[in-house]
Image (cartoon, coloured by chain):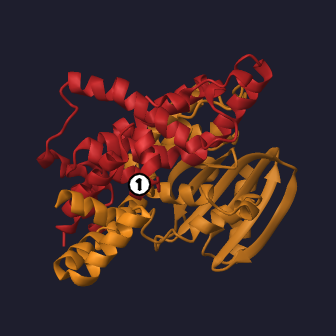
Chain colours: A orange, B red
Amino acid sequence: MADEDAEIVALIDNELDEDASARLLTRLATDEALRKRYEALREARAPIAGAFDALIEKAPLSRLRAALPPESAPRAALGPFARIAFRDIAAGVIGFLLGVGAAAWIASVAPRGEQEDWRAAVVQYTNLYTNETFSPLHPDAALQALELSAVGARVGARLTPETVALPGLRFTVAFMLSFAGSPLALIAYVDAQGAPVLLCVIDNHAPDAGMGSERRGELSLANWSRGGRGYLVIGRISEERAVELAGMLKERI
Amino acid sequence: MNHELFARPTRLSSNARMSDASRREVRAGLEPCLARLWRYGLVLSRASDVAEDLVQATCARAIERADQFVSGARLDRWLFAILRSIWLSEIRARRVREGGGFVDAEDALSTDGAHLIETNILAAEVLKAVGRLPEAHRETVFLVYGEGYSYAEAAKALEIPIDTVMSRLAAARVALAKLK
Protein backbone atom coordinates (compact mmCIF):
# COMPACT_ATOMS: atom_id res chain seq x y z
CA MET A 1 0.00 0.00 0.00
CA ALA A 2 2.78 2.40 0.95
CA ASP A 3 4.65 1.67 -2.27
CA GLU A 4 1.43 2.04 -4.19
CA ASP A 5 0.78 5.43 -2.55
CA ALA A 6 4.30 6.51 -3.42
CA GLU A 7 3.70 5.62 -7.06
CA ILE A 8 0.36 7.41 -7.11
CA VAL A 9 1.87 10.54 -5.59
CA ALA A 10 4.76 10.42 -8.06
CA LEU A 11 2.25 10.09 -10.90
CA ILE A 12 0.34 13.13 -9.62
CA ASP A 13 3.58 15.07 -9.31
CA ASN A 14 4.56 14.05 -12.85
CA GLU A 15 7.66 12.35 -11.50
CA LEU A 16 6.91 8.74 -12.38
CA ASP A 17 8.80 7.17 -15.26
CA GLU A 18 6.95 6.35 -18.46
CA ASP A 19 6.57 2.60 -17.97
CA ALA A 20 5.37 2.83 -14.39
CA SER A 21 2.98 5.64 -15.35
CA ALA A 22 1.47 3.56 -18.13
CA ARG A 23 0.98 0.59 -15.79
CA LEU A 24 -0.63 2.70 -13.11
CA LEU A 25 -2.88 4.56 -15.53
CA THR A 26 -4.13 1.25 -16.89
CA ARG A 27 -4.99 0.09 -13.39
CA LEU A 28 -6.64 3.40 -12.55
CA ALA A 29 -8.94 3.01 -15.54
CA THR A 30 -10.37 -0.19 -14.14
CA ASP A 31 -9.89 -0.08 -10.36
CA GLU A 32 -12.37 2.24 -8.70
CA ALA A 33 -10.88 1.93 -5.20
CA LEU A 34 -7.48 2.88 -6.56
CA ARG A 35 -9.04 5.82 -8.38
CA LYS A 36 -10.58 7.09 -5.13
CA ARG A 37 -7.23 6.84 -3.44
CA TYR A 38 -5.66 8.75 -6.34
CA GLU A 39 -8.27 11.51 -5.96
CA ALA A 40 -7.74 11.81 -2.22
CA LEU A 41 -3.97 12.07 -2.59
CA ARG A 42 -4.25 14.47 -5.52
CA GLU A 43 -6.40 16.90 -3.55
CA ALA A 44 -3.87 17.06 -0.74
CA ARG A 45 -1.25 18.84 -2.82
CA ALA A 46 -2.88 22.25 -3.37
CA PRO A 47 -3.33 23.08 0.32
CA ILE A 48 0.28 22.16 1.07
CA ALA A 49 1.67 24.60 -1.47
CA GLY A 50 -0.86 27.21 -0.35
CA ALA A 51 0.11 26.85 3.30
CA PHE A 52 3.78 27.34 2.50
CA ASP A 53 2.88 30.37 0.36
CA ALA A 54 0.92 31.87 3.25
CA LEU A 55 3.85 31.30 5.54
CA ILE A 56 6.35 33.24 3.46
CA GLU A 57 4.30 36.38 3.84
CA LYS A 58 4.87 36.20 7.59
CA ALA A 59 8.64 36.39 7.38
CA PRO A 60 9.94 39.19 9.66
CA LEU A 61 11.68 40.89 6.75
CA SER A 62 12.50 44.14 8.51
CA ARG A 63 14.48 42.34 11.18
CA LEU A 64 16.06 39.90 8.74
CA ARG A 65 17.21 42.80 6.57
CA ALA A 66 18.48 44.74 9.56
CA ALA A 67 20.64 41.75 10.51
CA LEU A 68 22.24 41.40 7.07
CA PRO A 69 26.01 41.90 6.94
CA PRO A 70 26.84 45.35 5.53
CA GLU A 71 27.38 45.50 1.76
CA SER A 72 30.55 47.54 2.21
CA ALA A 73 32.05 49.87 4.80
CA PRO A 74 29.25 51.31 6.94
CA ARG A 75 28.15 54.82 6.04
CA ALA A 76 28.77 57.64 8.49
CA ALA A 77 25.07 58.15 9.17
CA LEU A 78 24.66 54.48 10.00
CA GLY A 79 26.62 54.21 13.22
CA PRO A 80 26.50 51.16 15.45
CA PHE A 81 24.24 52.99 17.89
CA ALA A 82 21.55 53.48 15.27
CA ARG A 83 21.68 49.84 14.27
CA ILE A 84 21.47 48.54 17.80
CA ALA A 85 18.78 51.00 18.79
CA PHE A 86 16.64 49.94 15.88
CA ARG A 87 17.04 46.27 16.68
CA ASP A 88 15.89 46.89 20.23
CA ILE A 89 12.91 48.78 19.01
CA ALA A 90 12.15 46.16 16.41
CA ALA A 91 12.01 43.55 19.13
CA GLY A 92 9.56 45.72 21.03
CA VAL A 93 7.14 46.04 18.17
CA ILE A 94 7.48 42.52 16.85
CA GLY A 95 3.78 42.00 16.28
CA PHE A 96 3.49 45.14 14.30
CA LEU A 97 6.51 44.40 12.14
CA LEU A 98 5.04 41.02 11.29
CA GLY A 99 2.10 42.91 9.90
CA VAL A 100 4.19 45.10 7.69
CA GLY A 101 6.36 42.20 6.58
CA ALA A 102 4.00 41.44 3.74
CA ALA A 103 4.19 45.02 2.58
CA ALA A 104 7.98 44.99 2.67
CA TRP A 105 7.91 41.77 0.72
CA ILE A 106 5.70 43.30 -1.93
CA ALA A 107 8.13 46.16 -2.29
CA SER A 108 11.02 43.76 -2.64
CA VAL A 109 9.41 41.76 -5.43
CA ALA A 110 7.93 44.67 -7.37
CA PRO A 111 8.63 44.51 -11.09
CA ARG A 112 11.92 46.01 -12.12
CA GLY A 113 10.28 48.95 -13.89
CA GLU A 114 8.64 50.03 -10.65
CA GLN A 115 11.82 49.49 -8.69
CA GLU A 116 13.06 52.61 -10.42
CA ASP A 117 10.39 54.61 -8.65
CA TRP A 118 10.34 54.20 -4.89
CA ARG A 119 7.15 56.17 -4.71
CA ALA A 120 5.41 53.50 -6.81
CA ALA A 121 6.43 50.85 -4.27
CA VAL A 122 5.14 53.01 -1.41
CA VAL A 123 1.87 53.52 -3.28
CA GLN A 124 1.58 49.76 -3.72
CA TYR A 125 1.66 48.94 -0.05
CA THR A 126 -0.13 52.07 1.14
CA ASN A 127 -3.05 50.69 -0.83
CA LEU A 128 -3.01 47.70 1.52
CA TYR A 129 -3.30 49.78 4.67
CA THR A 130 -6.76 50.29 6.12
CA ASN A 131 -8.25 52.33 8.94
CA GLU A 132 -7.50 49.36 11.16
CA THR A 133 -3.82 49.02 10.34
CA PHE A 134 -2.33 51.68 12.61
CA SER A 135 -5.25 52.96 14.66
CA PRO A 136 -5.09 50.18 17.31
CA LEU A 137 -1.47 51.12 18.08
CA HIS A 138 -0.96 53.40 21.08
CA PRO A 139 2.73 53.06 21.98
CA ASP A 140 3.96 55.21 24.83
CA ALA A 141 5.65 58.50 24.06
CA ALA A 142 9.13 57.36 25.14
CA LEU A 143 9.06 54.44 22.69
CA GLN A 144 7.79 56.71 19.93
CA ALA A 145 10.64 59.15 20.53
CA LEU A 146 13.16 56.29 20.44
CA GLU A 147 11.70 54.96 17.22
CA LEU A 148 11.87 58.35 15.57
CA SER A 149 15.42 58.89 16.73
CA ALA A 150 16.54 55.49 15.45
CA VAL A 151 14.88 55.67 12.04
CA GLY A 152 15.95 59.30 11.70
CA ALA A 153 19.55 58.23 12.26
CA ARG A 154 19.20 55.58 9.56
CA VAL A 155 18.07 58.06 6.93
CA GLY A 156 19.89 61.12 8.26
CA ALA A 157 16.78 63.16 9.06
CA ARG A 158 15.98 65.10 12.23
CA LEU A 159 12.94 63.21 13.44
CA THR A 160 11.49 63.97 16.87
CA PRO A 161 7.91 63.94 18.19
CA GLU A 162 7.92 67.72 17.79
CA THR A 163 9.28 67.91 14.23
CA VAL A 164 6.90 65.26 12.89
CA ALA A 165 3.76 66.46 14.74
CA LEU A 166 0.92 67.34 12.34
CA PRO A 167 -2.45 68.95 13.06
CA GLY A 168 -5.43 66.61 12.98
CA LEU A 169 -3.20 63.54 12.84
CA ARG A 170 -1.90 61.22 15.55
CA PHE A 171 1.61 59.83 15.07
CA THR A 172 1.57 56.07 15.75
CA VAL A 173 4.78 54.29 14.80
CA ALA A 174 7.99 54.71 12.82
CA PHE A 175 9.87 51.84 11.27
CA MET A 176 12.43 50.99 8.62
CA LEU A 177 11.94 49.49 5.21
CA SER A 178 14.45 49.29 2.41
CA PHE A 179 14.08 50.09 -1.25
CA ALA A 180 16.67 48.95 -3.81
CA GLY A 181 19.30 48.99 -1.07
CA SER A 182 18.40 52.47 0.22
CA PRO A 183 17.07 52.82 3.76
CA LEU A 184 13.48 53.98 3.79
CA ALA A 185 11.92 55.35 6.97
CA LEU A 186 8.18 55.23 7.34
CA ILE A 187 6.36 57.38 9.87
CA ALA A 188 2.71 56.46 10.20
CA TYR A 189 -0.10 58.74 11.35
CA VAL A 190 -3.84 58.24 11.62
CA ASP A 191 -6.64 60.77 11.45
CA ALA A 192 -9.66 60.80 13.75
CA GLN A 193 -11.24 57.97 11.75
CA GLY A 194 -8.08 55.88 11.80
CA ALA A 195 -7.24 56.55 8.14
CA PRO A 196 -3.48 56.26 7.62
CA VAL A 197 -1.26 59.08 6.39
CA LEU A 198 2.41 58.30 5.93
CA LEU A 199 5.58 60.31 5.87
CA CYS A 200 8.36 58.45 4.07
CA VAL A 201 12.01 59.48 4.00
CA ILE A 202 14.50 57.69 1.76
CA ASP A 203 18.25 58.20 1.77
CA ASN A 204 18.74 57.68 -1.96
CA HIS A 205 21.13 60.50 -2.93
CA ALA A 206 18.41 62.11 -5.03
CA PRO A 207 19.09 65.61 -6.38
CA ASP A 208 17.23 68.45 -4.67
CA ALA A 209 13.73 69.02 -5.97
CA GLY A 210 10.95 71.38 -4.95
CA MET A 211 7.50 70.38 -3.77
CA GLY A 212 5.52 68.34 -6.26
CA SER A 213 2.19 66.61 -5.91
CA GLU A 214 0.05 64.13 -7.76
CA ARG A 215 -2.88 61.74 -7.43
CA ARG A 216 -2.41 57.97 -7.80
CA GLY A 217 -5.75 56.23 -7.57
CA GLU A 218 -7.31 57.11 -4.23
CA LEU A 219 -4.03 58.40 -2.87
CA SER A 220 -2.55 61.87 -2.87
CA LEU A 221 1.22 62.30 -2.88
CA ALA A 222 3.28 65.36 -2.03
CA ASN A 223 7.03 65.00 -2.30
CA TRP A 224 10.30 66.90 -2.32
CA SER A 225 14.02 66.11 -2.15
CA ARG A 226 16.73 67.83 -0.17
CA GLY A 227 20.22 66.93 0.95
CA GLY A 228 20.23 63.59 -0.89
CA ARG A 229 16.99 62.49 0.70
CA GLY A 230 13.56 62.06 -0.81
CA TYR A 231 10.50 62.92 1.26
CA LEU A 232 6.93 61.85 0.59
CA VAL A 233 3.60 62.45 2.30
CA ILE A 234 0.92 60.02 1.16
CA GLY A 235 -2.60 59.15 2.20
CA ARG A 236 -6.24 58.97 1.19
CA ILE A 237 -6.54 62.71 1.55
CA SER A 238 -6.95 65.60 -0.87
CA GLU A 239 -3.95 66.68 -2.86
CA GLU A 240 -4.14 70.12 -1.24
CA ARG A 241 -4.06 68.58 2.23
CA ALA A 242 -1.05 66.43 1.28
CA VAL A 243 0.83 69.53 0.07
CA GLU A 244 -0.16 71.44 3.22
CA LEU A 245 1.13 68.68 5.52
CA ALA A 246 4.29 68.24 3.45
CA GLY A 247 4.92 71.99 3.63
CA MET A 248 4.81 71.90 7.44
CA LEU A 249 7.18 68.96 7.61
CA LYS A 250 9.56 70.48 5.09
CA GLU A 251 10.00 73.48 7.37
CA ARG A 252 11.03 71.33 10.34
CA ILE A 253 12.88 68.15 9.36
CA MET B 1 26.74 17.83 3.81
CA ASN B 2 26.37 18.29 0.11
CA HIS B 3 29.97 18.34 -0.95
CA GLU B 4 29.24 19.33 -4.51
CA LEU B 5 27.52 22.52 -3.43
CA PHE B 6 30.40 23.42 -1.17
CA ALA B 7 33.13 22.38 -3.59
CA ARG B 8 35.65 25.13 -4.03
CA PRO B 9 36.10 25.99 -7.70
CA THR B 10 39.85 26.16 -8.19
CA ARG B 11 39.63 28.74 -10.95
CA LEU B 12 38.29 31.22 -8.39
CA SER B 13 40.11 30.32 -5.24
CA SER B 14 43.44 31.94 -5.99
CA ASN B 15 42.14 35.12 -7.50
CA ALA B 16 41.46 37.87 -4.99
CA ARG B 17 39.57 40.05 -7.44
CA MET B 18 37.28 37.21 -8.38
CA SER B 19 36.81 36.54 -4.68
CA ASP B 20 35.63 40.12 -4.17
CA ALA B 21 33.30 39.72 -7.11
CA SER B 22 31.89 36.52 -5.59
CA ARG B 23 31.36 38.26 -2.29
CA ARG B 24 29.51 41.09 -3.99
CA GLU B 25 27.41 38.63 -6.00
CA VAL B 26 26.52 36.63 -2.91
CA ARG B 27 25.84 39.73 -0.79
CA ALA B 28 23.58 41.23 -3.46
CA GLY B 29 21.64 37.99 -3.72
CA LEU B 30 20.97 37.54 0.00
CA GLU B 31 18.11 39.97 0.43
CA PRO B 32 15.72 38.45 -2.13
CA CYS B 33 16.21 35.05 -0.43
CA LEU B 34 15.61 36.15 3.17
CA ALA B 35 11.93 35.27 3.44
CA ARG B 36 12.40 31.87 1.85
CA LEU B 37 15.40 31.09 4.05
CA TRP B 38 13.38 32.04 7.12
CA ARG B 39 10.57 29.76 5.97
CA TYR B 40 12.99 26.88 5.53
CA GLY B 41 14.42 27.57 8.98
CA LEU B 42 10.91 27.61 10.41
CA VAL B 43 10.00 24.30 8.75
CA LEU B 44 13.13 22.71 10.20
CA SER B 45 13.04 24.23 13.67
CA ARG B 46 9.31 24.98 14.10
CA ALA B 47 10.28 28.12 16.01
CA SER B 48 10.41 31.56 14.41
CA ASP B 49 13.20 32.87 16.66
CA VAL B 50 15.39 29.90 15.74
CA ALA B 51 14.51 30.47 12.09
CA GLU B 52 15.74 34.06 12.37
CA ASP B 53 18.99 32.91 13.97
CA LEU B 54 19.42 30.39 11.19
CA VAL B 55 18.96 33.03 8.50
CA GLN B 56 21.43 35.32 10.18
CA ALA B 57 24.02 32.57 10.55
CA THR B 58 23.43 31.45 6.97
CA CYS B 59 24.00 34.95 5.58
CA ALA B 60 27.17 35.41 7.60
CA ARG B 61 28.47 31.98 6.53
CA ALA B 62 27.60 32.69 2.89
CA ILE B 63 29.66 35.88 2.91
CA GLU B 64 32.57 34.08 4.58
CA ARG B 65 32.47 31.34 1.97
CA ALA B 66 31.50 33.47 -1.00
CA ASP B 67 34.54 32.26 -2.93
CA GLN B 68 33.04 28.76 -2.87
CA PHE B 69 29.95 29.91 -4.72
CA VAL B 70 30.09 29.17 -8.43
CA SER B 71 29.13 32.37 -10.20
CA GLY B 72 25.90 31.99 -12.11
CA ALA B 73 24.74 28.94 -10.11
CA ARG B 74 21.50 29.11 -8.14
CA LEU B 75 22.31 31.15 -5.08
CA ASP B 76 19.05 30.21 -3.33
CA ARG B 77 19.88 26.51 -3.47
CA TRP B 78 23.40 27.17 -2.24
CA LEU B 79 22.05 29.21 0.68
CA PHE B 80 19.54 26.49 1.48
CA ALA B 81 22.36 23.96 1.67
CA ILE B 82 24.27 26.23 4.05
CA LEU B 83 21.21 26.77 6.24
CA ARG B 84 20.58 23.03 6.39
CA SER B 85 24.19 22.36 7.26
CA ILE B 86 24.11 24.90 10.10
CA TRP B 87 20.84 23.47 11.37
CA LEU B 88 22.10 19.91 11.38
CA SER B 89 25.57 20.53 12.68
CA GLU B 90 25.07 23.39 15.11
CA ILE B 91 21.66 24.64 16.13
CA ARG B 92 19.72 21.40 16.09
CA ALA B 93 22.42 19.65 18.07
CA ARG B 94 22.55 22.50 20.57
CA ARG B 95 18.77 22.47 21.04
CA VAL B 96 18.82 18.76 21.66
CA ARG B 97 21.55 19.21 24.27
CA GLU B 98 19.53 21.95 25.92
CA GLY B 99 16.39 19.86 25.87
CA GLY B 100 14.55 22.24 23.55
CA GLY B 101 15.05 20.37 20.32
CA PHE B 102 12.58 17.75 19.36
CA VAL B 103 9.08 18.69 20.26
CA ASP B 104 6.50 15.95 20.49
CA ALA B 105 3.64 15.72 18.07
CA GLU B 106 1.30 17.30 20.60
CA ASP B 107 3.61 20.27 21.07
CA ALA B 108 3.98 20.69 17.36
CA LEU B 109 0.32 21.69 17.24
CA SER B 110 1.30 25.07 18.59
CA THR B 111 4.31 25.64 16.38
CA ASP B 112 5.03 29.15 15.30
CA GLY B 113 4.23 28.60 11.65
CA ALA B 114 0.64 27.59 12.22
CA HIS B 115 0.24 30.26 14.86
CA LEU B 116 1.51 32.98 12.55
CA ILE B 117 -1.13 32.36 9.93
CA GLU B 118 -4.01 31.56 12.20
CA THR B 119 -6.27 33.86 10.19
CA ASN B 120 -5.96 31.44 7.27
CA ILE B 121 -7.58 28.43 8.85
CA LEU B 122 -6.92 25.88 6.14
CA ALA B 123 -3.28 26.91 5.79
CA ALA B 124 -2.86 26.80 9.57
CA GLU B 125 -4.40 23.31 9.70
CA VAL B 126 -2.12 22.11 6.92
CA LEU B 127 0.92 23.57 8.64
CA LYS B 128 -0.04 21.92 11.89
CA ALA B 129 -0.30 18.62 10.04
CA VAL B 130 3.05 19.25 8.36
CA GLY B 131 4.47 20.20 11.77
CA ARG B 132 3.44 16.81 13.15
CA LEU B 133 5.46 15.00 10.50
CA PRO B 134 8.94 13.77 11.39
CA GLU B 135 11.62 16.32 10.56
CA ALA B 136 12.92 14.39 7.57
CA HIS B 137 9.43 14.11 6.05
CA ARG B 138 8.66 17.75 6.80
CA GLU B 139 11.79 18.90 5.05
CA THR B 140 11.14 16.74 2.00
CA VAL B 141 7.57 18.00 1.69
CA PHE B 142 8.78 21.57 2.01
CA LEU B 143 11.51 21.30 -0.61
CA VAL B 144 9.26 19.62 -3.17
CA TYR B 145 5.92 21.35 -2.58
CA GLY B 146 7.07 24.59 -1.02
CA GLU B 147 10.20 25.23 -3.05
CA GLY B 148 9.53 23.32 -6.24
CA TYR B 149 12.48 20.92 -6.08
CA SER B 150 12.15 17.96 -8.41
CA TYR B 151 12.35 14.55 -6.76
CA ALA B 152 15.90 14.20 -8.06
CA GLU B 153 16.90 17.62 -6.75
CA ALA B 154 15.40 16.88 -3.34
CA ALA B 155 17.16 13.52 -3.21
CA LYS B 156 20.46 15.21 -4.00
CA ALA B 157 19.97 18.01 -1.47
CA LEU B 158 18.96 15.59 1.27
CA GLU B 159 21.45 12.89 0.21
CA ILE B 160 18.82 10.19 0.09
CA PRO B 161 17.57 7.85 -2.67
CA ILE B 162 14.64 9.01 -4.82
CA ASP B 163 12.57 6.11 -3.47
CA THR B 164 12.89 7.64 -0.02
CA VAL B 165 11.73 11.00 -1.34
CA MET B 166 8.72 9.25 -2.86
CA SER B 167 7.79 7.38 0.29
CA ARG B 168 8.15 10.50 2.49
CA LEU B 169 5.96 12.54 0.17
CA ALA B 170 3.36 9.79 0.02
CA ALA B 171 3.26 9.49 3.81
CA ALA B 172 2.80 13.24 4.08
CA ARG B 173 0.03 13.29 1.49
CA VAL B 174 -1.75 10.44 3.27
CA ALA B 175 -1.57 12.38 6.55
CA LEU B 176 -2.84 15.54 4.90
CA ALA B 177 -5.60 13.75 3.01
CA LYS B 178 -7.03 12.83 6.40
CA LEU B 179 -7.58 16.50 7.21
CA LYS B 180 -10.77 16.57 5.18
* Residue A143, above or below A198: above
Dividing the picture into quadrants, the one containing residue B21 is top right
**Dot 1: within a 10 Å radius of its alpha carbon, few (fewer than 14), some, or many (20 or more) residues?**
many
Residue A156 picture location, percent across and down: 70, 39
* Residue B38, above or below B8: below
* Left/right of residue B97 with respect to residue A245 in the rendered view: left
Q: Quadrant of the C terminus of chain B?
A: bottom left
Query: Subunit of mark 1?
Result: B
Q: Is residue A13 visible?
A: no
Q: Which residue is at the front of the view, A118 or B122?
A: B122
The residue that appears at 35% across and 64% down in the rendered structure is A20
Furthest toward the top, the residue is B14
The residue that appears at 45% across and 49% down in the rendered structure is B152
The residue that appears at 42% across and 52% down in the rendered structure is B151
Residue B132 picture location, percent across and down: 20, 50
Residue A98 picture location, percent across and down: 42, 52
Q: Secondary structure at mark 1?
A: helix
The residue that appears at 82% across and 44% down in the rendered structure is A227
Q: Amino acid at mark 1?
A: Val
Q: Quadrant of the N terminus of chain B?
A: top left
* Residue B116, above or below B61: below
Q: Is residue B135 visible?
A: yes
Q: Which residue is at the front of the view, B165 or A167?
A: B165
Q: Which residue is at the front of the view, A208 or B85?
A: B85
Residue A159 picture location, percent across and down: 63, 44
Residue position marked by numbered label 1 in the rendering: B144
